[in-house]
Image (cartoon, grey):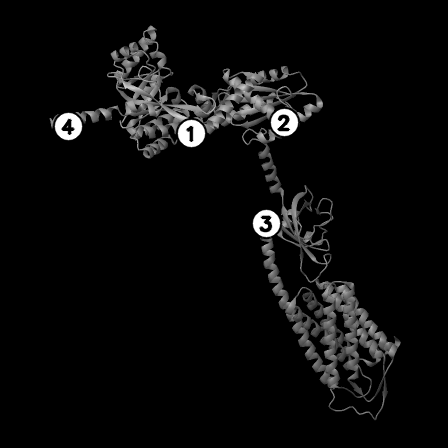
Amino acid sequence: MLKVLTCLTGQHDFRLVLVAGLVCFAACFTAFRLFSRLRGARGLVRGAWLLLTGLVAGSGVWATHFIAMVAYDPGLKTGYSPAGTLLSLMIAVLFMAAGFAVASAERTRTNDCAGGLLLGLGIGAMHYTGMSAFVTQGYVLWEQATVAASVVIGVSFSAIALVIAGRARSLTKQLIGGTVLTLGVCGLHFTGMGAVTIMPDVNVVVPEQLLSGAMLTLAVTAITGLIILGGLGAVTIESSTSRSALDRIRRLANAAYEGIVVVQDGRINDANAAFCELAGAQLGDLVGKPLYTSMLTFDGKEAAREGVRREGLLQPLEGGRAIPVEVFSRLMDDGARTETSGLTVLAIRDLRERRSAEEKIRYLAEHDGLTGLPNRNSLQARLAAALERVEASGETLSLVCIDLDHFKEANDLHGHLAGDALLVEAARRLQDSVSAPSFAARLGGDEFILVQIAAGDQPAAAAELAGRVLEQLSTPAVYEGQDLAMGASLGVSLFPDDGRTAEALLANADMALYRAKESGRGVYRFFKREMDETIRERRTLARELRQAITDEELVVFYQPLARAADGEVCGFEALVRWKHPVRGMVPPLEFIPVAEENGLITQLGEWVLRRACADAASWDRPLRIAVNLSPLQLNQPNLPTLVHEVLIATGLSPSRLELEITESALFKDYQRALDNLRRLKALGVRIAMDDFGTGFSSLSTLQSFPFDKIKIDKSFVENIHRHDRATVIVRAVLGLGRSLEIPVVAEGVETQEQIDFLRGESCAELQGYAIGRPGPIDSLSAWTLARAAAAAANEVETKARGAA
């Protein structure tokens, strides 16, 4: 060591030594700057960066050696062999490139040490090859131990520089790495110079063609300066390009709705604006903060796994409520191949809006959107849970099915908003009538359910609840300053007497509700076994009727109408009959109400209309055909369109079709019914009022619409001459028809006495058993072909007379 210091202090020019050190540091620092780009590169780009790194590092080490050699003054004439000098440069570049290539292949201590070994060996090989090009007037002797020590110094400091520099991402690490490597290069050089002893010999001649110190200094400075400047320029250009690209990426990242955060070794390296907003802090405050330990948690686990979607909680830096988030993780390719050393990119999505939407969807899936009560789906689950509870606890349970009596009236008279207000008020009152664990639910429309869980005996507790509910729902509701009538009918089933399952209790409560409606509404009824059979029979009949319409088991019978003056048939009324394969001929009084209750009447009425029009179009005589319209049909918006389509399809003249309606049908939806009737009249179809006299506003109805015919109900006709009041009513109706110039038809005519009376009172047409009974189309030939046969006979007789 003393000899090394003596050599340095006594035989070197400190000014040139300082220049050599600065050149070495510049080259080593530049090499580590290039090394940072080398780790993330691939293919040809990686090769280019590697070549430039080796060239800068090798030329810098080579320049350091020869500038220091120029600073060395042994007191003898010296020179340098061009071949050896050039060879040492090539060795330095080659070893430096190899060392950095090994260190950048994978981020491990083994690779750093292996790379450092190659760097140190390269520095030593370059130094001692360069010393072989040193020529002086004497003989150079080497101290082997000091030579070995110099190589150890170079290898050690090179390995330490690579370990410290790491990925060489930050400027600080690049400066430290460059400084340590500079110490290694200088340490190897001056230790190696301390191993030199020159024995002067005047007989040794230094050739004139050798490189002089001045020439060498100029060449080394020029070459090394250009190389280092080229390396720094490449780094600067690439850094500028990278910053521009990074700025574009950052702008794109900041435009993203999701939070994006880059994590290195568990700490935040970078983040976009969305993540900063989630974290409630500025980027500068977040960089370097541990992400997994205090901010982001995954069900007690520390980190997200690559490529796996996970949900967790993000705790804002400033405190407050944790934010539910969804996290996607990816490794950023930065040249490192281990998960612990690479950069991890996390995409973090705020789940608060989604959770809120999911909660809302879950609520809507289980609750009625208008009233907020549990809906049908939720009722099934809650009722099943209630049944399990009472089974285990010994409590009692009753189920009350509720139907509002005046809901449709509120809708028709005041609009749907009024109907909605009525439903909301009914729901509020039902909720107030029970307390947990009992509950209310809405099945749909104006139908509600109450489930009562009580400790008291049944049916007393259920009867008390039903009475209380009827009382609460009897008070009118106020809507926009108007009183809306309220009322309800209730059906009650009990557990376990009326069923042990939710389905059975609901079905039996519904049957009890049906019985309550039949009893006049505004009452409650308990389920009874005998009502089960009756209602089941009606439902079976409805199911069979639906199938009968599809299978065309229905037939149309026709009852004739005759002119009162001469008794000649002028038309027929179509009457539907059901020819059941098992029950036989089912009377209309049995299946028509069933069709009305189950919504089949529209389908049934359309079938009858099509069949009757088709049959009438086939008759030889242009007789009228009368078809009854149900109230539901009359209020269908597409009724005129349907009638028009049927007339076109069958070819029946509109003037031959007569549609009969009852007064009660008009008042389901009065305005719509009148609109439909006017549109039908515009088609040329005749409109008749059926069962005149049984309604409650017949005269106002006649005033509102110009009917083509009035039909007196048979309840009045059959009492002619039996009851004076009936006779007076019939005579008054006939007089009214004459005054309004509306033809009057008398239904239910069965005796000659009735015919004579009606004919004397100028009744227009008659219908009843005295004229003809209803029959199938095959039985109508006597009426539908009579005029054609008579016309044929007259034609034959006319021809015969002409021939005579």
Q: Nearer the viewer, residue 100 or 616?
A: 616
Report whether 453 appears left or right of 79: left
Q: Nearer the viewer, residue 491 or 764?
A: 764
* Type of amino acid under label 4: Lys
Question: Which of the image's four quarters has the C terminus?
Answer: top left
Residue hosting label 3? 257
Whichever of labels 4 and 3 marks the residue nearer the N terminus, that label is 3
Residue at x 66% of width, y 70% of height: 47
Give the Cα distance between marks 4 and 2.
Answer: 87 Å
User: In terms of secondary structure, where does tag 3 sit?
Assistant: loop
Question: Foreground mark, 4 or 3?
Answer: 4
Residue hosting label 4? 799
Query: Height in image: 246 above or below 416?
Result: below
Whichever of labels 4 and 1 marks the residue nearer the N terminus, that label is 1
Q: How many residues crowd mark 1 within 10 Å: few (<14), some (14–19), many (20+)?
A: few
Residue 377: which disc? Answer: none
- For the residues bearing labels 1 and 2, Cβ distance under 8 angstroms: no
Whichever of labels 1 and 2 marks the residue nearer the N terminus, that label is 2
Q: Nearer the viewer, residue 339 or 750?
A: 750
User: Where, by quadrant of the figure, is residue 722 drawn?
Assistant: top left
Whichever of labels 4 and 2 marks the residue nearer the N terminus, that label is 2
Residue 552: which disc? Answer: 1
Q: Residue furthest left?
A: 804
Question: Which of the image's four quarters has the N terminus?
Answer: bottom right
* Type of amino acid under label 2: Leu
Tell me how many marks there are: 4
Question: Foreground mark, 2 or 3?
Answer: 2
Residue 408 rendering spot, x and y as whole percentages: 47, 24
